[in-house]
Amino acid sequence: MPHRNVTKKQALDYHQFPQPGKISIEATKSVETQQDLSLAYTPGVATPCLEIEKKPENAYNYTSKGNLVAVISNGTAVLGLGNIGALASKPVMEGKSVLFKKFSALDSFDIEVDTEDVDSFCNTVIAIAPTFGGINLEDIKAPECFEIERRLVEELDIPVMHDDQHGTAVISAAAIINACKLTHRKIENLKVVVVGAGGAAISCARLYRHMGVKTIYMIDSKGVIHSGRNDLNDFKREFADHGYMTHSEVFECADVVIGLSRPGTFSVEDIKSMADNPIVFALSNPIPEVFPDEVLKAREDAIVATGRSDFDNQVNNVLGFPFIFRGAMDVRARKINIEMKVAAANALAELATKEVPEYLSKLYGKNLEFSRDYIIPKPFDKRLIVEVSSAVALAAIETGSSTMEDFDLDSYKKELANRLE
């Protein structure tokens, strides 16, 4: 498939015209008369204020809290740009807010916090958390991202998720599930090589292990992570449960490689030594570790995914975060636990095996059906909000993250189907 390029001028014009930025605020109530004004502000607004003071849960009834998610970053690990700072990260955070609105009908504020200090960042988020029904952490570098997320999840009673970690984990897990179906493998028998050891890599490996993968090798910038190394942080040490092995040795007969690093950190020669029907996810963006055409030239039997939209099998976080937050927030879950993430991955995998609606085939200009070139759904599949959000909501209730009573799954699915209309 040809690469699609966006010019610098196109990108800047898109962000500047007809008005700067990508988001705005719209009122949901009429303010056209004196009566409207009296209800919207003083004196009418005092009534819901007092109801919330008496019972904080009433904020979900009388304010936008239940449909409002914060996208919060300090700009220390932005896309493929690195540590560009809080202000420079704002276009990305606005973009994330647009995706929340487009795909899950969740409203969002982007918030850029100008600090790299973990305590300061956490204190800021905790202080503003009452405004929101959920908090999406974004583009925060490792290892600080682990501690920041841990503290906020522990401190707050609303869903908190660092999408760079868990979004990639959920989507890639769904893709692995379906690649295993196509190649007649069992999850528990996989030999997985994770190239990269940052936030996304650690979270991916954790989720795969929770789903049953027993053999995981991780490679960082200094080589294979193993028990003999004394330069590992606590997070890398989780995957140092084997003795010294070389880079080439871990690729020998590996079933899966997940690239979460940078171009060139593994090669076609590595892929040639993998098992039959290798599962190759080169997820470095915008340049993958190895391009799909190079992989398939060397291994025609490979199943390949990237993070790019101009190749088949895009591991795109937009398949996850809008619907995970939608489901979690709709049942007022206190946390997004690992069972909810697994439910999202399973729902995504199952959706890809179903007959694809005609509008999607038209949009993408080809017939789409479950195959090596279609192992995960497309972002514009309108069924995502129904299938993924309902699976997450149900998992929240079944695991006790939500205490909502009388949850009707069928009614909730119908409600979700109507949300984007």
Image (cartoon, rainbow, N blue to C red):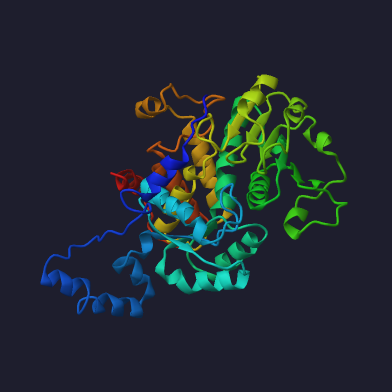
Kindly indicate the quadrant of the structure image that contains residue 59.
Answer: bottom left
Kindly indicate the quadrant of the structure image that contains residue 45.
Answer: bottom left
Q: Look at 37% across and 71% down and name the residue there.
A: 57
Q: Is residue 314 left or right of residue 277?
A: left
Q: Look at 49% across and 55% down and name the residue there.
A: 396
Q: Position of residue 121 (x, y in %)?
A: 56, 69
- Residue 337 shows up from this direction: yes
Q: Look at 57% across and 56% down and name the residue there.
A: 84
Q: Look at 66% across and 48% down and name the residue there.
A: 201
- Residue 299 shows up from this direction: no
Q: Position of residue 229 (x, y in %)?
A: 86, 53
Q: Nearer the viewer, residue 57 or 260?
A: 260
Q: Position of residue 151 (x, y in %)?
A: 60, 68
- Residue 185, relative to residue 106: is it above or below? above
Q: Nearer the viewer, residue 98 or 346?
A: 98
Q: Position of residue 113 (x, y in %)?
A: 52, 66
Quarter of the rendering occupied by the C terminus: top left
Number of numbered discs overlaid on the protein picture: 0
Q: Is residue 158 left or right of residue 236?
A: left
Q: Nearer the viewer, residue 151 or 76?
A: 76
Q: Residue furthest front?
A: 9
- Residue 307, relative to residue 412: is it above or below? above
